[in-house]
Image: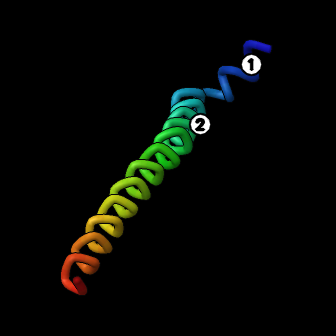
Amino acid sequence: MAEFFHMGGYALYVWGSFGVTLLLMVIEPMLLKSRRRAILKRIARMARLNVGEVS
């Protein structure tokens, strides 16, 4: 079992790659969620401005 985690001397590279990938897979949905929220706020603001112009 220790040999599996040691990865033939490449453990730092292999486990580091897994760690970075996991981190990015956690961060990406969070960034998308905040970007979506900002875009929806911008669209709502633009819609309010357009309604004010029509009246």
Residue at image position (54%, 32%) is 19
Callout 2, which amino acid? Phe
Gap between marks 2 and 1 measured at Cα = 17 Å
- Residue 49 in percent (x, y) is at 22, 74
Asked whether the beta carbons under mark 2 and mark 1 sit within 8 Å of each other, the answer is no
Q: Name the residue carrying label 1.
A: 3
The residue carrying pointer 1 sits among few (fewer than 14), some (14 to 19) or many (20 or more) residues within 10 Å by Cα, namely few
Callout 1, which amino acid? Glu
The residue carrying pointer 2 sits among few (fewer than 14), some (14 to 19) or many (20 or more) residues within 10 Å by Cα, namely few
Q: Identify the secondary structure beneath mark 1.
A: helix
Residue nearest the viewer, comparing 4 with 30: 30
- Residue 18 in percent (x, y) is at 59, 36
Quarter the C terminus occupies: bottom left
Quarter the N terminus occupies: top right
Residue at image position (75%, 23%) is 4
Query: Which residue extends farthest front?
Result: 55
Residue nearest the viewer, comparing 53 with 1: 53
Apparent side of residue 15 relative to residue 47 in the rendered image (left or right): right
Q: Name the residue carrying label 2.
A: 18
Q: Can you tell which of label 2 and label 1 is closer to the viewer?
A: 2
